[in-house]
Image (cartoon, grey):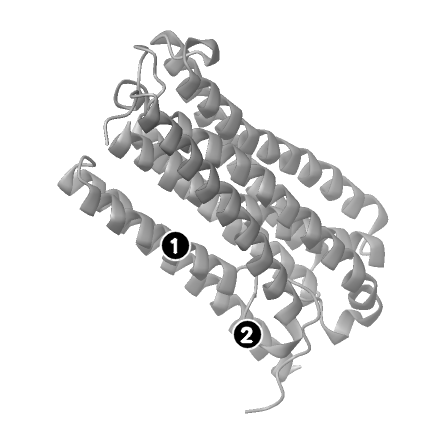
Amino acid sequence: MDKRSEMHRRERRRYVIGYGGSLLLTFAVFGIAYRFGIETKGVYLAISLLGLAQLIVQLVYFLHIDRRRSSREDLDLILFSTMVLLIIILGTVWIMGNLAVRMHTFPM
Amino acid sequence: MKRAPTHSYPGLNLGRRHASADKASEVVTFGFWVFLMSDLVYFGLMFAIYITMIDAQAGGPGPHELFDLKSIFAQTLILLTSSLTVGLAMLALKYNLPRWRIVFWFFVTLVLGLSFLVLEVRDFMSMAEKGGIPQRSGFLSAFYGLVPLHGLHVTAGCIWLIVLGIQLRIFGLTDLLMSRVVRLALFWHFLDLIWIGIITIVYFGGLTYG
């Protein structure tokens, strides 16, 4: 009985840590945007890195995806989907950007 | 350290206490995860279109006139909190807390989900007032193809919460319903992940490059 309530506490703490971490990252992102404005690329780089960090925090603490052997398949699936996504997104941006430059609609 | 608890599908596992429901969840939850990943690819396509369309504003209103970061901030906090509450519902289920606790956390999640939708629709309405309608420019078409798609998913999640909450009250904690709660929690967490992509790429990306 005791062991069980301890497990409960531990797993609840995991959710709360994930929530706290995400909250912190969210405040950081909006704080940066508020403090420095959102015009420069450096600021945007910081914002996107914080966004990436938040994705990882939520994957680990909310979705319980980690590198333990038993959840490897789920992780494999995420990595494969991410690869497909990157091919689609980067490929589209590359081709369409190139096209825009050739059509002189997009100063580069 | 003792042996880690068995973990056989994404998300919080029901564990040995609910052995039969846990076993029943294994295959369907992995299947549901495959669905979520293909949904992710669909969202990815919409993101790709949005990125290529950022400059295609055709003289219409752009991100700086249309986006209201305060409202986006509020929506982000609401959705994040609802991700926590759906996790607490899962914990209540896993550790055999009284059934009303599960339904209570479902209710809180539902209220948060609905408040998110109200704020989002208000944003769309104020955008439309400023002339930001889908047919105005390629940029706006891409925006309205992506962000409301996420809203539609949240709406589906809210309906799912209502239906499952009622089913739980009527039928109690059957194996089938428990494994549905597992998938609903996954779905809800997944929507929060997509939302992070939306604030980073659609809102901040739009404001930086638009």
Q: Amino acid at mark 1?
A: Leu
Q: Tell me residue A71's x, y (percent).
A: 63, 70
User: Looking at the image, which is closer to me, B170 or B76?
Assistant: B76
Q: Residues within 10 Å of mark 1 (few under 14, many from 20)?
A: some
Residue at 75% x, 75% y is B16
Which residue is denoted by mark 2 in the rendering? A67
Question: Disc 2 sits on a residue from what chain?
Answer: A
Q: Amino acid at mark 2?
A: Arg
Quadrant in which residue A105 is drawn: top left
**B46 lies above or below B122:** below
Question: Disc 1 sits on a residue from what chain?
Answer: A
Tell me if B29 is positioned left or right of B80 in this view: right
**A46 lies above or below A103:** below
Quadrant in which residue A17 is drawn: bottom left
Q: Earlier in the sequence, mark 2 or mark 1?
A: 1
Residue at 56% x, 66% y is A65
User: Looking at the image, which is closer to me, B37 or A90?
Assistant: A90
Which residue is denoted by mark 1 in the rendering? A52
Alpha carbon of mark 2 to alpha carbon of mark 1: how far? 18 Å
Quadrant placement of the N terminus of chain A: bottom right
Q: Tell me residue A72's x, y (percent).
A: 62, 71
